[in-house]
Image (cartoon, grey):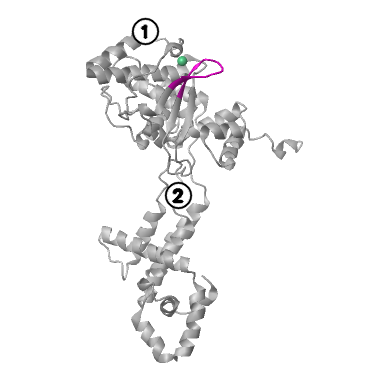
Amino acid sequence: MSEMAQMVPAAVRERLAAGAHSVLVDAAALDAVRQRFDAEQAQALGRYLAAAQSPNTLRAYRSDWVAFTAWCAAEGRRALPADAVDVAVYLAAAAETRHSDDTGRWALSAATLERKAAAIAAVHAAQGLASPTRADVVRMTLRGIRRRRRSPPQRKRPLLLETLERLLEQRPGPAYPGGVARLRDTLLLLAGFAGALRRSELAAISYDDVVCDHDLSTGDPLLVVSLAATKTDQQAQHGQRVALPRGRRAATCAVCAFAAWSQVLQAHRDGGTAAVRAVVEQAATAVDDHEHVCHTYAGTDLADGSARALFPPVSRHGHIGQRPMSGRAVAELVKRYAQRAGLDPDAFGGHSLRAGFATQAALGGASDREIMRQGRWSNPRTVHGYIRTAHPLEDNAVTRLGL
Ligand SMILES: [Zn+2]
């Protein structure tokens, strides 16, 4: 807001700026203006005041005010005049909002939250009321928001291959019923890591999205997963495809894990819990993590057009749900394994698999282009961040200081 605009009483400013912004109209103040000035003077003033605030700001104020009144209605509080503590609580709650993707970024910037407070102040001023935003509690809350926004949000730690293997060691044993979750979690962790998948993407995969194919150059089996178009990826109307190749070792082979888990779900479909138990017990006795089974794998008839979830919930007792796991449940699964492995569960989440892919790939010598392709990153800066994590000294002048 310009200095000039601040010097003029807000009630006058708002009324003269635009009659269409009814939320900011103060009829009493308008009458006072008409009494004290002649029409020409009022019009001249009006022209400049109208230019002081952009239509965008007024539009934003209006939607901010609507959001605040909706919150007040939901909380059973009065919006006009508002109580200062209510405004502070409202701003703090809004500040806590995170993006719905799994990066944990703040949804609203400090500037947006300040604008929300300014909108509340403007409406009060337009009604000739003292603004609750001048109260200490609101000013302190805004100061706290600005300070917290300066410190970078906590990023989920990348899950490197070595850590992934530690997590895999924490799986339940192969015997029934723990073996059911073991087989699902093996595929989930390997697919999430190899595919650089977001937790929401993992949760949403259905059997109809997975095709068992072969790599044309090596003849090795490979899974191709089609991802539905995501919110963060609006250009890709058709969605994207991610290849999950055969692992070098059977224990970390996504295709083997897919084959083993699909056998369980087929048994579940055809024979219920008893059949699942038989398949898991059979697999537990024949367990040999060193032998690939994927080279003869021909796919599954679970891809039948019914959008059967690839990752349904599995209870402690081995019961398999029908609906897909939620993205949150995927993140909790990663955290649970991290905790069992003696790692800080707060540092890991659904995003750790995706971040781990990029960092591990960079450690393996992959180029930005290669990493961006599998991870479907369109902004090289995101990938450069992971590469810097992987190679802190590479391409870095600190190595030339002669220390
Ligand atoms: Zn395999």
Residue 106's disc number? 2
Q: In this picture, is 219 found above or below 105?
A: above
> For residue 213: magenta?
yes
Residue 302 is situated, as x and y percent measured from the top left of the image, at 32, 22
Most foreground residue, 206 or 317:
206
**Left of 155 or right of it: where is 368?**
right
Identity of the residue drawn at 32% across and 32% down:
324
- Residue occupied by mark 1: 286
Residue 85 is situated, as x and y percent measured from the top left of the image, at 34, 63
Q: In this picture, is 30 found above or below 196?
A: below
Q: Residues within 10 Å of mark 2 (few under 14, many from 20)?
A: some
Q: Quadrant of residue 21?
A: bottom left
| Amino acid type, mark 1 | Ala
> For residue 331: magenta?
no
Most foreground residue, 219 or 92:
219
Q: Secondary structure at mark 1?
A: loop
Please provide the residue range marked out in magenta: 212-223
| Label whose residue precedes the other's in the sequence (2 or 1) | 2
Q: Establish whether ligand 1 lies closer than 8 Å to the Cβ of label 2.
A: no
Q: In this picture, is 144 found above or below 15?
A: above
Residue 313's disc number? none
| Amino acid type, mark 2 | Trp
Q: Quadrant of residue 182?
A: top left
Identity of the residue drawn at 39% across and 55% down:
94
Residue 388 is situated, as x and y percent measured from the top left of the image, at 61, 37
Q: Secondary structure at mark 2?
A: loop
